[in-house]
Amino acid sequence: MRVAYFSPMPPERSGISDYSALLVPALRERMDVVVVRRGRKRSPRGTDVALYHVGNNPDAHTWIVEALRRRPGVVVLHDFVLHHLVAGMTIGRNDVPGYLDALEREHGVPGRLLGYAVVERRIPSLWESRPLDFPLAWFVLEHATGLIVHSRTVHDLARKAGYEGPIWIVPMPAWPVPSVEPRRIAPGPVVGCFGILNGSKRIPELCHAFAAVRARHPDATLLLVGASSPGFDLERRLRSLGVDGEGLVRRKWVDEQLLWELMAGVDVSVNLRHPTMGETSGSAIRSLTLGLPLVVSDVGWFSELPDEVALKVPVAADEVERLEAALELLVTQEGLRRSLGAAAAELAKSEHDLGHVADLYLAALEASAGGAAVAEAVLAEVSEAASEVGISRRDADAAEIARRLAEVELGR
């Protein structure tokens, strides 16, 4: 099988670029993968199936969506909410009618009227103020012959939106931990937050909660690593929150080696999110591989993490107080940190193993390339095997087999 692979790739600074740099070598051990050069909107000749990685960044993914429109294929949906991408591809190119049409197609005339209000600057942009209400996912879904998603959350959102094609849930692969020396930035307990820093990462809430913990534990340090997103003045916000210099260490964009060193040197990894766009966090996966205890928001994919690996904080009126309590537990209880961290490392080795993920990609792409013939062949083999061991359609075992087949979208 020969696959046309559309994705941001290094040296682009993108989480999906890092993801593909990790995944492509593993896929090439199983199939012929042709990585399509950035900006090219046609699949290479002789490819059996096209695979499109789609995220919410217009700069990184506009050309990929344009290629998808030329040749439908399997979409790796990294975010379910694609409003920011759609806005960049329409309003960002002075195509106001295209933006209004997208809103009306998914949300009717009220959606179109709201779009007018956004364009006229009478209301805040919907992709910033109400992204979950207006995901605009059909802008991409209508061209997808199948979806690869990283969570049950996005699977269910796509079904709820009316997508009827095949969907494969494939965990995000875990990065192999390089041989690095942990870089400790302070002698006391260190709480780290990694990745692009913006409003949805709940940085103000994290700083408020950490300040309360530090008041009781002056040797605790908060480490913030990552570039700020455009329009999010993190430094000004930190000054206004009054987080003192001794309790805060700030690093902007760092290279891969230093990122691993800093992550390996923290005691607790915090990865909050609200609103969520349906994304899976690459920095959270890296934390799992390092065996770090996690504190996450109780939303989306983060809610699907086992309770044994993460403390989950609801996004509610008492969010700061609950976050403070979670940090207090992890700062003071080394045994809890060890147990959460051990479970995290085990999860990374099993569910997020790179080889396992590549095998699931292979199965999904083979099924897509073969279409209904593959599904029929699999069902025929399962039926024959069941018959050979004496299972009839009236047996309880037959019902269980049917349930398992439905889980993998066979015989839906």
Image (cartoon, rainbow, N blue to C red):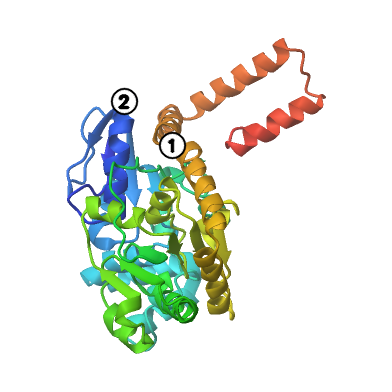
Mark closer to the observer (1, 2): 1
Q: Residues within 10 Å of mark 1 (few under 14, many from 20)?
A: some
* Element carrying mark 2: loop
Position in image of residue 15 (x %, y %): 31, 54
In the rendered structure, which amino acid carries the disc numbered 2? Glu
Q: What residue is rendered at 50% in x and 62% in y?
A: 295
Q: What residue is rendered at 69% in x and 35% in y?
A: 403
Asked whether, in this view, residue 269 is left or right of residue 386, the answer is left
Compared with 232, 196 (above or below) is above
Asked whether, in this view, residue 2 is left or right of residue 279, the answer is left
Position in image of residue 314 (x %, y %): 58, 70
Q: Quadrant of the C terminus?
A: top right
Q: Nearer the viewer, residue 187 or 214?
A: 187
Compared with 261, 270 (above or below) is below
Position in image of residue 325 (x %, y %): 57, 72
Residue, disc 2 = 29
Q: Nearer the viewer, residue 331 or 26?
A: 331
Position in image of residue 215 (x %, y %): 46, 82
Q: What residue is rendered at 41% in x and 71% in y?
A: 220
* Element carrying mark 1: loop
Q: Say if residue 139 shows up in the picture.
A: yes
Q: What residue is rendered at 22% in x and 63% in y?
A: 253
Q: Nearer the viewer, residue 100 or 317?
A: 317
Q: Say if residue 233 shows up in the picture.
A: no
Q: Residue 6: which quarter of the image?
A: top left
Asked whether, in this view, residue 302 is left or right of residue 380, the answer is left
In the rendered structure, which amino acid carries the disc numbered 1? Asp
Residue, disc 1 = 353
Q: Nearer the viewer, residue 44 or 9?
A: 9
Compared with 350, 212 (above or below) is below
